[in-house]
Amino acid sequence: MSRRFHFGLLALLVGAAAPLAAQQDRMQHDEMKKDTMDRDAMAKDGMAKDGMAKDGMAKDGMAMDHGMMMLPHGTFAGAEGHKAGGSFALAREGDQTLLRLGDDFRVEKGPEVYVALSAGARPSAGAVFLGKLSKFSGAQVFDVPAGTDLKAFTHVVLWSKKDNVAFGTASLAVGDAMMHK
């Protein structure tokens, strides 16, 4: 074969490859643009790249720990004629489970108000008292004792031991609870 034929064939191959490379570059660019638009939309909605909100809550409202296990959280409401509000979330730190009251937490002042895990809106047999409130508003943290089976509880109760009355309650997401070892 002649040299001229080889150069012609080479030119033909290079000419055919250029549009394919350009198309592949456009496809990669479009894919990168879509990823950027998805991240921007998630950020606009207050969601991080991995689907988590800044406060550690997933889009469906369940708290997530570092191992991506769903942990219960919720919002308090007043009970038995008392006022309460604000959020709580269970969190894992190492091998310890904690119940965290949010910055927005508030409850009407009362004597000896404790935080308890209960199988109902009032502490019953088997309720676990996590501790006494140190203040009636703002963030606070309580340790959940090792071995506590969170699936056994349906509520977080703000309970006055002195008056034997609930000041507030919040539902626990039973289906997504976990066993604290």
Image (cartoon, grey):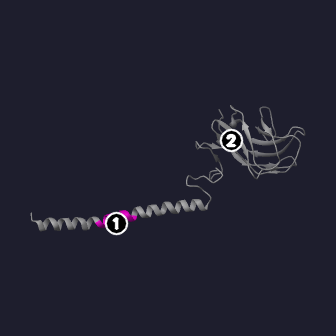
Q: Quadrant of the C terminus?
A: top right
Q: Earlier in the sequence, mark 1 or mark 2?
A: 1
Q: Is residue 146 left or right of residue 135?
A: left
Tell me the kind of residue under disc 2: Val
Give residue 167's quadrant in the image. Answer: top right
Q: Is residue 83 left or right of residue 75?
A: right
Looking at the picture, does residue 44 appear above or below residue 88?
Answer: below
Determine the secondary structure under disc 2. helix
Residue 156: x, y in percent? 76, 42
> Is residue 119 visible in this depiction of the protein?
no
Q: Say left or right for 85 vs 94.
A: right
Q: Give the x, y percent position of residue 100.
A: 72, 44
Question: From the viewer's perspective, is 35 left or right of 98?
Answer: left
Between 100 and 85, the one lying in front of the other is: 100
Q: Amino acid at mark 1?
A: Ala
In the rendering, at what x and y percent does residue 80 appear? 86, 46
User: In what quadrant of the picture does the N terminus appear?
Assistant: bottom left
Indicate the quadrant where residue 32 lies. Answer: bottom left
Q: Position of residue 119 (x, y in %)?
A: 76, 37
Q: CA distance from mark 1 to mark 2?
A: 54 Å
For the residues bearing labels 1 and 2, Cβ distance under 8 angstroms? no
Task: Examine the rendering and report whether any part of residue 61 can be seen.
Answer: yes
Q: Which residue is mark 2?
A: 174
Instruction: Provide the residue span drawn in magenta.
Output: 18-26
Q: Mark 1: which secondary structure?
A: helix
Q: Which mark is residue 22?
A: 1
The residue located at (72%, 42%) in the rendering is 99
* Residue depicted at x 65% and y 47%: 63
- Looking at the image, which is closer to me, 78 or 131? 131
Relative to 117, say whether 9 is above or below.
below
Instruction: Tell me the residue at 60%/42% (across/down).
Output: 69
| Circle number at residue 118 | none
